[in-house]
Image (cartoon, rainbow, N blue to C red):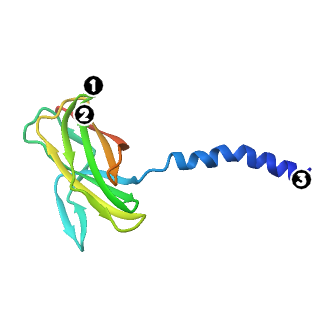
Amino acid sequence: MRTLAILCILGMLSPNLLLAGKYRQAAYLTNLYFANKLQQESGFVQPDKVFNKLKASDKDVGAFLVLNLVVEKGEHQLEVDILDRDGTLFDKLKFDPVLASQDDWVYTATGQFGGELPTGGIFFKIYDSHDGGAKEVIGTFRLMTAEW
């Protein structure tokens, strides 16, 4: 009876154990933030001022996007599509390929964007291509934009 109970529990858990590998990614975002300018201190990228909204419709507005990632061993090609609230692409960030020498390799990518941003928020869709494979979405984020 005890053996049967254990087998039943394992049977119930096994689909979830099998699916765990299905959702594995080659890259994970651990943090993302927006800054007005960046500095380097002791080999690390540091923001001057971090914010969560930008002025819309101002051609002089600019910001840095900072992505902190943990990646698997191999070559990674990161891209970011910047979309308006209707999903229309209006800017794109493409980064140089990154070669991770081991699994769980920590990496920081930075890119700059700006100009006349649309009102109602902008969306950042982040992609990774691992070792020349298909481009996969590893995260989507929103930044508020408004006129003031």
Amino acid found under the numbered disc labelled 1: Asp
Q: In the drawing, what numbered circle is on residue 86?
A: 1
142 or 147, nearer to the observer: 142
C-alpha distance separating marks 1 and 3: 57 Å
Secondary structure beneath disc 1? loop
Amino acid found under the numbered disc labelled 2: Leu
Q: Give me the residue at 22% from left, 52% from top.
A: 95
**Residue 20 x, y percent position in the rendering:** 57, 49
Q: Nearer the viewer, mark 3 or mark 2?
A: 3
Amino acid found under the numbered disc labelled 3: Arg
Q: Give me the residue at 70% from left, 47% from top.
A: 13
Q: Which residue lies furthest to the top in this view?
A: 86
Q: Give me the residue at 24% from left, 72% from top.
A: 43
Q: Residue 83 sits in which quadrant?
A: top left
In-image side of 51 versus 29 (left or right)? left
C-alpha distance separating marks 3 and 2: 56 Å
In contact (CB < 8 Å): disc 1 and disc 2: yes
Q: Residue 80 sits in which quadrant?
A: top left
Q: Which residue lies furthest to the bottom in this view?
A: 42
C-alpha distance separating marks 1 and 2: 8 Å
Q: Which quadrant is the C terminus positioned in?
A: top left
Secondary structure beneath disc 2? strand
**Residue 66 x, y percent position in the rendering:** 26, 54
